[in-house]
Image (tube, rainbow, N blue to C red):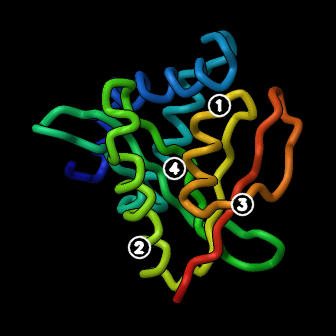
Amino acid sequence: MELRYINFEKDKDIILKFRRDTHIISNGAEEGFDEDAYLNRMRRRINKFPNGQLIVEKDNKAIGQLGLLVRDYCGKSIGYINLIYLIPEYRARGYGREMLKYAEEFFRKLSLNEYHLRVSSTNKNAFEFYRNFGMKKICEENRKNKVFLMGKVLDK
């Protein structure tokens, strides 16, 4: 597995495909997915955190995406995973674990000792995966669909 920085123009179609799939997994349908809004968010993220916006590749094939950034939470800066995605045939094969390890090292290098992510309440496999990686459910949030905010405090 290799990670490389997203090249917006080159990767636009693949990041749209990956985000659309995560939207369907979380919401049960493509309805409500706004391509233009997502592309605009990605442009901003790439400009602000270019080394945190990554394509995951295996044998030169894009198999996933990882989005990392820094957010304010209760008055302190923390890491935030805004997207962790693998295409179905690469799930449950250890790549997600490698992606989380990369994220933790990324946050440590920024001197952040905590990170969060959100997971759909309907995505039981992902919730268990994160829990088994040491993340704790912080709270439930009622957005369009219920999600769990999960977090982990990093060892020094």
- Give the residue number, with chain letter if any, for mark 2: 105
Between residue 12 and residue 4, name the one nearer to us.
4
Label 2 environment density (alpha carbons within 10 Å; few <14, some 14–19, many ≥20)? some
**Disc 3 residue type?**
Lys
Between residue 110 and residue 145, name the one nearer to us.
145
Q: Earlier in the sequence, mark 3 or mark 4?
A: 4
Q: Earlier in the sequence, mark 2 or mark 3?
A: 2
Q: Earlier in the sequence, mark 2 or mark 1?
A: 2
Marks 2 and 4: which is nearer the front?
A: 2
Q: Earlier in the sequence, mark 2 or mark 4?
A: 4
Q: Check contact, mark 2 vs mark 1: CB within 8 A.
A: no
Q: CA distance from mark 2 to mark 3?
A: 19 Å
Above/below status of 5 relative to 120 = below
The spot of residue 52 in percent (x, y) is 41, 59
Above/below status of 136 relative to 89 = below
Q: CA distance from mark 2 to mark 4?
A: 23 Å
In the image, 13: left or right of 127? left
Instruction: Give me the residue at 75% from left, 51% from top.
Output: 149
In the image, 83: left or right of 138? left
Label 3 environment density (alpha carbons within 10 Å; few <14, some 14–19, many ≥20)? some
In the image, 139: left or right of 67? right
Instruction: Give me the residue at 33% from left, 46% from top.
Output: 95
- Give the residue number, with chain letter if any, for mark 1: 123
**Disc 2 residue type?**
Glu
- Give the residue number, with chain letter if any, for mark 3: 136
In the image, 56: left or right of 60? right
- Give the residue number, with chain letter if any, for mark 4: 44
Label 4 environment density (alpha carbons within 10 Å; few <14, some 14–19, many ≥20)? few
Marks 4 and 1: which is nearer the front?
A: 1
